[in-house]
Image (cartoon, helix red, strand yellow):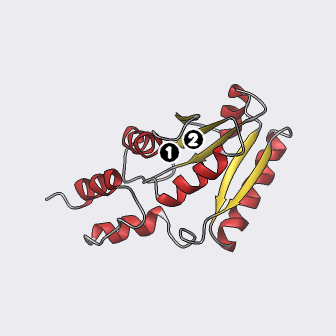
Amino acid sequence: MGIRDAAYPGSFDPITFGHVNIVKRSIERFDNLYVVVVNNPNKKYLFSLQERIEMVKKDLEDIPNVIVESFDGLLVNYLKEKKIYNLIRGLRAVSDYEYELQMANANHMLFPQLEIFFLMADTDFSYISSSMIKEIASYNGDVSKWVSKFVELKLKEKLLKK
């Protein structure tokens, strides 16, 4: 852990190619990237924390210097504990920016040494969300353009079981 490390938190419910794209672009700029699967008790997830961690690890296993961890609680506490001073956030649209700006300001007030980097989603992924993918998959739609085969199978197992 150090000044050249960064964290990329998210619920990853499920992880998408958009998330993977942000990871690949981030790791080019930092020595290590901590992909932090967060668990918010106020949020309803399709997949359990363990399932989300499994999918994230599987999808990122071939990318060097990526560490997948989970955390419950205030993100800045995790960052301080790990001595990580760089935070990556992906943006798809203006609506993401408004929320992320509020979160960035709050995080910076709680952890002034924190630098927050916003990466715009690649145009191929700027319109997708985990929620959209779950909805399409729930109707047995083809989600292979947006998630790995592993995640696609997990979605089918979860959503289409009889």
Q: Amino acid at mark 1?
A: Pro
Q: Between 48 and 82, which is closer to the camera in this rendering?
A: 82
Q: Residue 54: where, in percent of width, then height?
A: 39, 39
Residue 157, relative to residue 96: is it above or below? above
Residue 21, relative to residue 140: is it above or below? above
> Residue at coordinates 53% horizontally, 46% vertically from top-left?
40
Q: Residue furthest left?
A: 162
Q: Residue 62: where, in percent of width, then height?
A: 47, 40
SS state under label 1 = loop
> How far apart are labels 2 and 1 at the CA level?
19 Å
Reading the image, the residue beneath label 1 is 41
At label 1, counting other C-alpha atoms closer than 10 Å, the crowd grade (few under 14, some 14-19, many 20 or more) is: few
Contact, CB < 8 Å: mark 2 with mark 1?
Answer: no
Q: Residue 88: where, in percent of width, then height?
A: 69, 49
The answer to which quarter of the image holds residue 1 is: top right
Reading the image, the residue beneath label 2 is 35
SS state under label 2 = strand
Decide which of tag 2 and tag 1 comes sooner along the chain.
2
> Residue at coordinates 62% horizontally, 45% vertically from top-left?
8
Residue 8, relative to residue 156: is it above or below? above
At label 2, counting other C-alpha atoms closer than 10 Å, the crowd grade (few under 14, some 14-19, many 20 or more) is: many
> Residue at coordinates 41% horizontally, 52% vertically from top-left?
45
Q: Residue 93: where, in percent of width, then height?
A: 65, 72
Instruction: Give the left or right position of residue 106, taking residue 67 as reference.
Output: right
Q: Amino acid at mark 2?
A: Val
Disc 2 vs disc 1: which is toward the camera?
A: 2
Instruction: Give the left or right position of residue 83, taking residue 24 as reference.
Output: right
